[in-house]
Amino acid sequence: MSRKQIAPRYIKNIVIVHGKSEDIICNYIKSNLRLPMEIYSHNKGKNNIEIGSLKSVLNNTVFKTQSKLAENYAIIPKKNLNKQDLEIFTIMDRDKCPDKFFNDYVSKEMFKKHWAYDLLTPIYNIECLEDVLSKAGYTDLRKNKKNYIKLFPINKGGFNLNEIVEFYEKLLTVKNISNLHLFVKKCLDSINTFD
């Protein structure tokens, strides 16, 4: 009897997150949609990654080259990757970032010389994620960030599309201060492309 070979399940989305709040939301989306998505943070989001330090993150041992990335994540083994093969999101709060840095982040100017330039999609929150969620109709999380895990719990059960669609629709109401809806939309669109 011959064994049926199982094709590898490649990831198509990697997310570099600003901090713990973004880490919790990404894990919430990943668990509800059952996506093979990787989330990169410093110490599970306990240490923030700022816009100003993104270049050093992208030049670390994980992201410095495509071959280093392939050593760390199960990406499609292809010489010239495109966004259909892999998309790298960076979800950042503006916080007190100077205008020049922030504009270079949003326009991708700061990534211009990086090998993954075409794969990168900057996601921003002006000023911070808590403001965005509050204006989208969620409880004000600035007072107690521990409520994130209650609002955005890890789904240990089955697939739950409705919660993420509802989250996406709320984010559409605040797209003037955040483009987080683009990331959530990509995740929703990805559920048909992950086999």
Image (cartoon, rainbow, N blue to C red):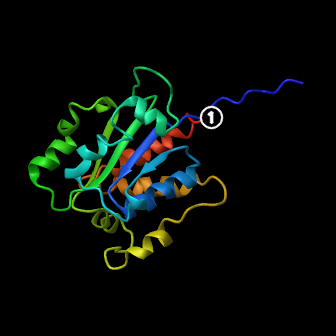
**Amino acid residing under circle 1:** Asp
**Residue highlighted by disc 1:** 195
Q: Which residue is drawn at 15% across and 57% down?
A: 97
Where residue 122 appears, as percent x and y from the top left, is 29, 44
> Extreme top residue here?
79
- Observer-nearest residue: 79 or 129? 79
Secondary structure type for disc 1: loop
From what the image shows, is residue 14 above or below residue 140?
Answer: above
The quarter of the picture where the C terminus appears is: top right
> Extreme front residue here?
61
Where residue 32 appears, as percent x and y from the top left, is 57, 54
Where residue 81 appears, as percent x and y from the top left, is 41, 25
Residue 140 falls left or right of residue 108: right
Q: Residue at x 21, y 43 (%)?
A: 106
Q: Which residue is drawn at 23% across and 36% down?
A: 111
From what the image shows, is residue 97 above or below residue 35?
Answer: below
Q: Which residue is drawn at 36% across and 39% down?
A: 63
Where residue 171 appears, as percent x and y from the top left, is 36, 56
From what the image shows, is residue 34 above or below residue 8?
Answer: below
The quarter of the picture where the N terminus appears is: top right
- Observer-nearest residue: 158 or 176? 158
